[in-house]
Image: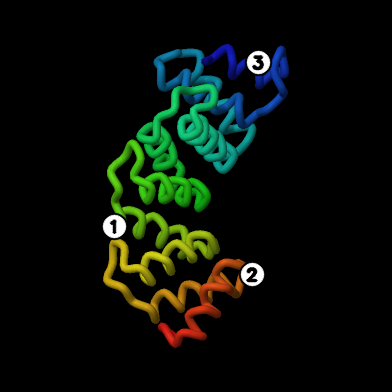
Amino acid sequence: MFNLGAAHYNGDGAADNSILACAWFLLAQEGGNPAAQDAVRRCAAEMGRLAAVDAIIEIGEMYEKGEDLPQSYSEAARWYRKGAAESPEAAMRLATVLMNGIGVKRDYGEVMAVCLDAAKKRYSPAEVCVAYLYRIGLGVAPDPKEAAKWYREAALQGHIRAELTLAEMYIKGRGC
């Protein structure tokens, strides 16, 4: 894994890709490679913390899709959790894995907590997630008014699905 990271870092036999390099270094570090610790620190210093979170998301995606790593939804969820507090994208990927419940325990309460945290950062896909959970009543009691509130927030940011769902709710007189 360390060698894959080095190849991507240096563009030697692999595409020059700092996110992939950092991802492989993180995996090598987790596997106990002492040289990987320095490489991970170097990646974080050069790329910044948010880019390092992108590497964490990359690892989760590799596990989720079974590309370059064995497919494992539980491993994907574990990596997405590492980035969820800092990245709304990681939070939504975690929410999707938990919502699907494939290879992990379906936990609507955790889905709501993760989506709500990301929604408070004004991330429209997370706002739609919170709205959906309130509209359907997953992990919370159904609350059409609260659902409409969150759909409105996402619609104000131009989220098409939120706009359509909110319009449907208006037409049917639900929560509006």
Q: Are the residues flagged by discs 3 and 2 in contact, CB closer than 8 Å?
A: no
> Label 2, on which residue?
158
SS for dot 2: loop
Q: Nearer the viewer, mark 3 or mark 1?
A: 1
Distance (Cα) linking label 3 and label 1: 41 Å
On screen, residue 4 above or below 122: above
Q: Which residue, given by chain and number where applicable, does mark 3 sit on?
A: 7
Disc 3 and disc 2: Cα gap in Å? 40 Å
Taking 92 as reference, is 15 left or right? right
Q: Is residue 58 above or below residue 164?
A: above
Q: Identify the residue shown where x is 40% and y is 44%.
A: 97
Q: Residues within 10 Å of mark 3 (few under 14, many from 20)?
A: some
- Residue ID at (72%, 18%): 11
In-image side of 31 versus 18 (left or right)? left
Find residue 109 and name its label. Answer: 1
Amino acid identity at mark 2: Gly
Q: In the image, which is nearer the foreground, mark 3 or mark 2?
A: 2
Give, as a three-letter code, the residue at label 1. Answer: Gly
The first of marks 3 and 1 along the sequence is: 3
Q: Measuring from the top left, give residue 171's x and y in whole percent.
A: 51, 85
